Image (spheres, helix red, strand yellow):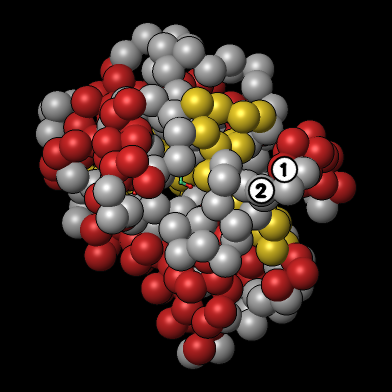
Amino acid sequence: MKVVVGNNDYISELIANEFIKVINVKPNCVLGLATGTSPLKVYANLIKANKEGRVSFKDVSTFNLDEYIGLEGTHVQSYRYFMNDNLFNHIDIDKERTHVLKGTGDYLAYAKEYDNLIAQAGGIDIQILGIGSDGHIAFNEPGASFDSLTHVETLAESTIKDNSRLFNDISEVPTKAVTMGLKSIMNARKIVLIATGKNKAQAIYNLLKGPKTEQVPCSILQDHKDCTIYCDEEAYSLVK
Ligand code: F6R
């Protein structure tokens, strides 16, 4: 794993440039996308690059990591809504080629098909990840199998608490999610992970220095051949 430390503006620009490079080499590439606060500046940079004509998403396909169970894609806290609002509505992408797991209806059937859909699209060329304070990636919580494909996960108490900042009340945070598994993520050809803030320091320490164990889901990334960890000074503070 490579590590890059810098402020959020700096690392977000570097990550956006990695995406732009991949897309410009392979215009019909497959992007793996995340929601949450961490990738917001990366997406802002991609929107800017698209508007300036430095990159086109015309032939790109995307697959998102996860979705809350119980929320329709039109719900303001759903991850489909997040992606439309923070990226897809502002770039020249064909929405038909954007995939977000379903949180309602026959979400299990779609989840079961998801890894096949990714494979049929050619596999993920570049995957962006955030990280939970408990070391989760996507919504693979401590104890998730390193062999997991897309599945249903019960959210850890700490995740529900972390994510409650975006809801009116903690009781509104869904307790389950559908998520790509750790094996699904490891199949990506290139992975970039972004972490900022003191809240992520222990998870980044465990990722970079700790043993590889299913109790620390992100530790599986130690085995990935092309994975770069981008963090700010605060997230990196326990490693030094
Ligand atoms: C989101 C996701 C989660 C987040 C993580 C960090 O699609 O898969 O693993 O990346 O919970 O969230 P933020 O960035 O909001 O701190």
On-image quarter of the C terminus = top left
Residue at 37% in and 63% down: 40
Eyeballing the image, is 229 above or below 152?
below
- Quarter-of-image position of residue 219: top left
Q: In this view, does 128 lie to the left or right of 194?
A: right
Disc 1 Cβ-to-ligand 1 distance below 8 Å: no
Q: x, y percentage for residue 10?
A: 26, 62
**Residue carrying label 2:** 104
Eyeballing the image, is 113 above or below 134?
below
Q: Is residue 172 left or right of residue 183?
A: left
Q: x, y percentage for residue 203?
A: 29, 27
**Tag 1's secondary structure?**
helix
**Residue carrying label 1:** 107
**Crowdedness near tag 1: few (<14), some (14–19) or many (≥20) residues, C-alpha within 10 Å:** some
Residue at 44% in and 29% down: 155
Residue at 48% in and 73% down: 85
For the image shown, how many numbered marks are present on the structure? 2
Residue contact at pointers 1 and 2, CB within 8 angstroms: yes
Q: What residue type is labelled 1?
A: Tyr
Residue 206 appearing in the image: yes
As measured in the structure, the alpha-carbon distance from the residue carrying label 1 to the one carrying label 2 is 6 Å
- Quarter-of-image position of residue 95: bottom right
**Tag 2's secondary structure?**
loop
